Amino acid sequence: MNTSQLERFKQRLLEIHAELTGKTPLRIEPNRTDEGRVGGDEDEQPLNEMMQAIASNRNRNSDVVLGRVLKALGKLREDPDSFGECEECGDEIPLGRLEAMPYVEFCVNCQGQKDAPKGGPTRRKLTDYS
Ligand SMILES: [Zn+2]
């Protein structure tokens, strides 16, 4: 990977970092434990709780992504040669995949193995038999 490509990924990572760290935070209303303030409309509460659950779930995913973004930025700074290599097998991650997710850590193969369910054979994917 050449310097201008690395620079482009760095910019992209910084953009993602900015998005995740404050420019557009997903709002969770503070003090939701104060149930007296939820209000008298009984229909409203389940929806609020659902929205809050969705929001906090998204934020949790954001934390994971943020960690990867920081890691990728650190890699760009300290060992740019290794940027874009799969952390599992060391293969180069295809550029298209990196462009979609500059913070990605693994190639498609290794990611697939990590995402694969650990359960019994009942949860195998069809492709396992091909
Ligand atoms: Zn790999």
Image (tube, grey):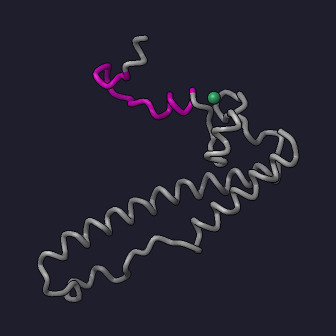
Task: Tell me if residue 28 comes above or below residue 129 in the rendering.
Answer: below
Tell me the residue at 35%/22% (across/down).
Answer: 124
Q: At which x and y percent is residue 108?
A: 58, 31
Horizontally, residue 121 falls left or right of residue 38, namely right
Q: Does the segment drawn in magenta span residue 111?
A: yes
Q: At which x and y percent is residue 46?
A: 19, 70
Tell me the residue at 50%/28% (across/down).
Answer: 113
Q: Quadrant of residue 53?
A: bottom left
Horizontally, residue 39 falls left or right of residue 23, namely left
- Give the position of the N terminus as an image quadrant: top right
Magenta region, residue range: 109-125
- Give the position of the C terminus as an image quadrant: top left
Question: Whereabouts is ligand 1, in terms of quadrant?
Answer: top right
Q: Quadrant of residue 67?
A: bottom right
Count how many numbered circles sit on residues in the image. 0
Q: At which x and y percent is residue 51?
A: 30, 67
Task: Tell me if residue 118 comes above or below residue 32 in the rendering.
Answer: above
Horizontally, residue 30 falls left or right of residue 112, namely left
